[in-house]
Amino acid sequence: MKIVVVGATGTIGKAIVAKLEQEHTVITASRKGADIAVDMTSIASIQAMYEQVGKIDALVIAAGAAYFGPLTGMTPEDNEQSIDGKLKGQMNLVLLGMEHVNDGGSFTLVTGIMMDDPIRQGASAAMVNGGIRAFVKSAAIELPRAIRINSVSPNVLQESWDKYADFFVGFNPVPVERVAQAFVKSVLGGQTGQNYEVY
Amino acid sequence: MKIVVVGATGTIGKAIVAKLEQEHTVITASRKGADIAVDMTSIASIQAMYEQVGKIDALVIAAGAAYFGPLTGMTPEDNEQSIDGKLKGQMNLVLLGMEHVNDGGSFTLVTGIMMDDPIRQGASAAMVNGGIRAFVKSAAIELPRAIRINSVSPNVLQESWDKYADFFVGFNPVPVERVAQAFVKSVLGGQTGQNYEVY
């Protein structure tokens, strides 16, 4: 399989690439430091990426910036960061990518535990996660040529616990390897319309 | 209570107003034909509405345009209609309205059944519904001064069945009165962070 991983340089992205590249051709994409430079907030950049990679079997997204900050004082512009980044970015990768994915191929998007188990300062990010989950469930019934679509919803990572423990009080962080394994299930398995909770 | 209903001229809005105005002061808002003209896609228009109404006890939203159309061929711009209308519109009514809502007041937003029970051509609208549900659940833990927030997720209405039956094949439409009753529960009840499914 020929698989593009967007956000390949992040903690989750690296773990996904490590698993998939053992038996597949993986093309890494990221803002910088990957095979292909892509800015998922830009339609032109997404289109350029697809033109560069040609036909693919799977697109995996492990990227997308969202706004974190107190609800009181959050401005429409703050919230827009989440919408432009993780929400529209991922949806546009699907909308503009459908024709580039081979028959029976797949899209795998990323959501996150905050939509189910809210934390302070996470309302804007939770919105994105819930939006992507619903989009995936609905898009699955319409994708042509047996193309599948799923999302993975990670808990906070053990690998990022030092940085985020104060935000995710009382959470039980999970190893990134388990999260990457859910992406593998989406890419190589047969399911569609699912949101894999790695909680 | 002093209650503002945005989208008061629609089928659901009218039914909400009919119930609430029996014992409360209801101010209707809509693009046109209501006490106050408001365009929820415009930050300036939302701000003008809040300045006009002063302090309120509850904001109810029964409005928000979303894009319907086949996933194949849906453009980023098509999807943007849903984001600008029903998603950002509702979120901005909350973000810009917090300071105008009295202690113990409430926000009630609107989602929809397509996020749980997808229909063809509904992927963009489903995204909005899922995003709002997650935002509501998360915002509820952060709202100050005992302000509550919920959403109502209506099934297709019996009153709109002639128009939408071909899209909602096999659904069992519900009377608008049941949907309005869920809004009443949100405004006058004690719960927060809920998405009331009227399925």
Image: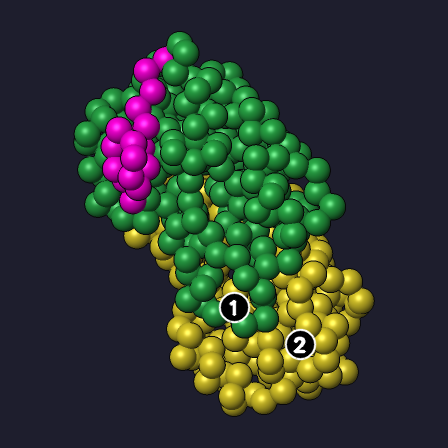
Chain colours: A yellow, B green
Instruction: Tell me if mark 2 has few (under 14), some (14-19) or many (20+) residues whose alpha carbon lies within 10 angstroms of its own.
Output: many
Up the image or down, A196 lies above or below B163; here it is: below
Say which quarter of the image contains residue A142: bottom right
| Magenta span | B24-39
Say which quarter of the image contains residue B31: top left
From the viewer's side, name the closer residue of A114 and A144. A144
How far is disc 1 from disc 2 in space, using C-alphas?
Answer: 20 Å
Mark 2 residue type: Ala
Element type at marker 1? loop
* Residue receiving disc 2: A58
Q: Position of residue A71 (x, y in %)?
A: 37, 38
Q: Where is residue B121 in the image (x, y as percent from the top left)?
A: 59, 59
Image disc number at residue B74: 1
Q: Which residue is drawn at 63% across and 87% down?
A: A55
In reply to whether residue B38 is colored magenta, the answer given is: yes
Q: Which residue is drawn at 74% across and 72% down?
A: A146
From the viewer's side, name the closer residue of B144 and B116. B116
